[in-house]
Amino acid sequence: MAIFRETVPRGVVAKLYEINWSIVLLLALLGLTGTAMLYSVADGAWDPWASRHVIRFAAGIALMLAVAMFPPRFWMGLAYPVYLAALVLLVGVELFGHTVGGAQRWLEIGPVRMQPSEVMKIALVLALARFYHDLDPDKVNGPVGLLIPAVLIALPAALILKQPDLGTALLVIVTGGVIVFMAGLSWKIIAAGAGAAAVGLPLFLAYGLEVYQRRRIMTFLNPEEDPMGAGYHILQSKIALGSGGLTGKGYMQGTQSHLNFLPEKQTDFIFTMLGEEFGFVGGIAVLAVYALVLANVVAIATVCKSIFLRLVVIGVGTTFALYVLINAGMVMGLLPVVGVPLPLISYGGTVMLTVLIGFGLILGAHIHRNAEPPRGTGLFG
Amino acid sequence: MRRDRQEYDLKFTRRALLLSGAGLLAFGALGARLYTLQILESERYRVLSDGNQFSFRLIPPPRGRVLDRFGEPVADNRDSYRVMLTPEQAGDVSAAVRRLAGLMPLSEDQQRRIIDTARRGPGFRPVLVAEDLDWETFAAINLHAPELAGVSPDVAEVRDYPFGPAFSHVLGYVQPASEEQAGNDRLLRHPGFRIGRAGVELARDEELRGAAGSLKVEVNAFGRVIRELPDQSIPPTPGDDIRLTLDADIQRFATERMSGESGATVAMDVNTGEILALVSTPGFDPNLFVTGISAANFNALQNNERRPLFNKSIQGTYPPGSTIKMIVALAALEAGVMRPEEAVSCRGHITLGDRQFHCWRRQGHGRVNMRDGVKTSCDVYFYEVAQRLGIGRIRDMLQRFGLGPAPDIGVAGVRAGIVPDEQWKRARFGQGWSLGETLISAIGQGYMLASPLHLAVMTARFASGRAVNPVLYRDRVPAEPAPMLGVNAAHLARMHDALEAVCHEPGGTSFALGGLGIPGVRMAGKTGTSQVYSITRQEREQGVRTQDQLPWRLRDHGLFVCYAPSDAPKYCVATIIEHGGGGSRAAAPPARDILRRLIERDPSGREGDLARIGAQRSREG
């Protein structure tokens, strides 16, 4: 054993001391930005969004810190059960779910209304990380190492796609794919997969999509074709952003937002409103904060000793990055309109909970970066 | 194992860097996109944003007023409290109308009409629910307006005709433009906008309309107005005021004096041609048309046998009867076919071929010279004149005095009269002219037709000796006096004397009137009767001897033309009372009263002195 063996802190105080406070600070900045924007959405009122957002955010931060205290062993033990539970919930949505806007996404259990697809985002990351942690690194490109992760990803992706929620399904697939890639997938297989995708994607677009999903993609490709129809949202969003200019129209002065030309501005289109009211300066600043958070996440991943923690950090970070990229890309007209919120700024409880629990795991990984939990053998080992 | 681990770590770090690079690229793409949108293309999107944010609402211009010669408004605008409904904002239109019906009186019919209109038009165009609401109802709706989506109470201007029926025919009225007329004209489609439908309102519509302004407003995505920006709006240009030559006081007086009768009166300044009164009775209340006349009211007007919708003063043409006799006599003097002193013997009728031509006085007038012939209106005298003149010279003189073609007074519907001759009859009936028709024409019967306006022009020309033309608008009064008619002044003077005798000498057909009733001022006039129906022999045997025993619609029309002062003519009046019996009895008294009012008030002698007139009026009132 080495002389300069880095230690794992023990006890809550020691662990709190090891918290990566720069991430917490950046997250707090985002949460408060969201609160301020939601205050503006309501035309200068705390109700109905801003007050709840800030309360949820405060509770979420506390939960995040609590999650960070648990050692990696705890999460490894939970990985498969949580994954299974999330899978069951997704099937439950299929059977008993609430339909919102033509898609079944919500499940009501007692007083709790939840989106199992959100739970799955964390669960899949944990399950895949656990799987690779337990796997002999030499077998990553073997039959077991390829097949099991493919099934772990494909099952939830198929169920989510059936809701139908194309955006989240893609998000789950890409997150899983990034984990598989980081686990050491060989470039040969990547090349083969890319070739298969080049063949399969057109087929999927032609046969695997709902009519509304295909129309969304078509209108995304040419929004000005149909300005009052499906392309309306994208066009109005671009008008709002563009008219914001360099410094924006001023806080609570966004005409596009306040005159209701923007749809769902408290959720999916909140970045548009931010861009309209604070201009290019505001938009870039927010993107920079997200980028800084992600840089910190990657840094944490590289200092983690265990495969489990590295992959958890990368997985959660990827999900977070995808949220930001898809949402911002969508409101700027770079991507089709898919219902993906801007994490921590958009209004919405489940997503905020998912993201902050995810960051709890990342902060926990940072605290326990030197821990080297043994490879498990059993399913719950 | 340790080497493996190190290699594995290295591989992970490499891939983490690769992933970071991909992330950086993606964030870079977002930044670049943001730069394109917000910096490079900002101007374009700002224009689109303004287009979203602002729209222009049409402001209808206030309609110009119509004023009488002294500036008193006879067609004005007043505030009307209205309720509008914007279907798009209301959502369920029928529900909104039902809720409104709880706040204000709205009949089932009206509700249906509103719902129909709302469904037909595009949803963003407001539909008029009701106007002219009283203040309490309007206040109640204002109070509830916030809960009634799409309902907007507002104040608009509506046309107001303060004199009601007195000016009904002259002014006409205003109504919303029809669907065809409106086309795509935003102003004509505006629910509060009205266009002229008849009379002066129609004739001078373009000037009265003015030009629409536009109000810049901020709207939200649903078209609801958030804010008005009056600083950046273009105010409407109000329509021009139109000033008439009419005197509101004379017009009203004449209307009242003739109430109960079906008839018309035209009063003119004999020297300028300015029309001072243009009255047709019965009239109607043009205010009824402004807010939409009910079918029942309209039918009542339409089916009334005294034709209130018909402007008898310019559209009604009647045989002028004896009112043209002084012109025929003048033609005889001018042609030199009759010496003034030459006497004709009247035995009540003459025989021409196998036909008898009667004088109105069955027992005859005895020996009659020209002055007596006019004074007593002896038909037999004029049969003799007619035979000597021939129809051509009668026609020429009557046309010189304005009969025949329709005078242009700047309103639609002025009817031409008829001054018949050989050519006219051949063209009209394809038949030749008979001498008997010349005789009948000389006493203003037969084919001859003239409107009250024609008769007023004839009287004005006769009184002034000038070729005056009738004028209805102050801005069209000619600056120069009208040219002389070119009639021998001595001949004209003889005729003036004869018409004075009609009113002031025993035996004159309107001697019974007792003159003008103003000491020192004498009048001149001529009666006329135009026959509508001949009492048959059978009826005569059954005891029907007088006009009074006939049904109203078969009785003769009474006519009277007059002017005063007779020594220096200033004003003339031509009056017809439909089915009123003889002119001396039915038409002369109201015409005389109107003429007296003109002399007393002397509207031409008090140009534009509004303040004094106003003060005087309030003292009188």
Image (cartoon, coloured by chain):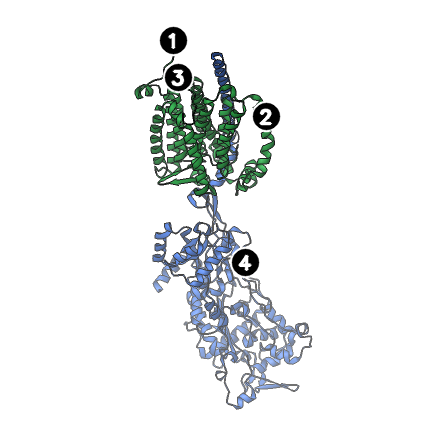
Q: Which chain is blue?
A: B
Residue at the spot of label 1: A3
User: In the picture shown, does residue B518 fall above or below A320?
Assistant: below
Q: Amino acid at mark 3?
A: Asn
- In space, the residues marked 3 and 2 are separated at their CA atoms by 36 Å
Residue at the spot of label 4: B480
Q: Chain of mark 1?
A: A
Whether residue B508 can be seen here? no
Residue nearest the viewer, comparing A257 with B206:
A257
Q: Which chain is green?
A: A
Percent coordinates x, y for residue A194 in the rendering: 58, 27
Element on which disc 4 rests: loop
Quarter residue B259 falls in: bottom left
- In space, the residues marked 2 and 1 are separated at their CA atoms by 45 Å
Percent coordinates x, y for residue B600 in the rendering: 42, 67
Kindly identify which numbered label has been placed on residue A370.
Answer: 3
Whether residue A369 can be seen here? yes
Q: Chain of mark 4?
A: B
The residue at 39%/26% (across/down) is: A77
Quarter residue A375 falls in: top left
Going from N to C along the chain, the mark reached first, 3 or 1, is 1
Q: Decide: few, some or many residues near mark 2? Use Cα within 10 Å; few <14, some 14-19, many ≥20.
A: few
Q: Amino acid at mark 4?
A: Glu
The residue at 52%/90% (across/down) is: B542
In which quadrant of the rendered image does the N terminus of chain A lie? top left
Instruction: Please say if the residues under marks 3 and 1 sit with CB atoms less than 8 Å apart.
Output: no
- In space, the residues marked 4 and 1 are separated at their CA atoms by 127 Å
Q: Decide: few, some or many residues near mark 4? Use Cα within 10 Å; few <14, some 14-19, many ≥20.
A: few
Query: Do the residues marked 3 and 1 share a common chain?
Result: yes
Kindly identify which numbered label has been placed on residue A192.
Answer: 2
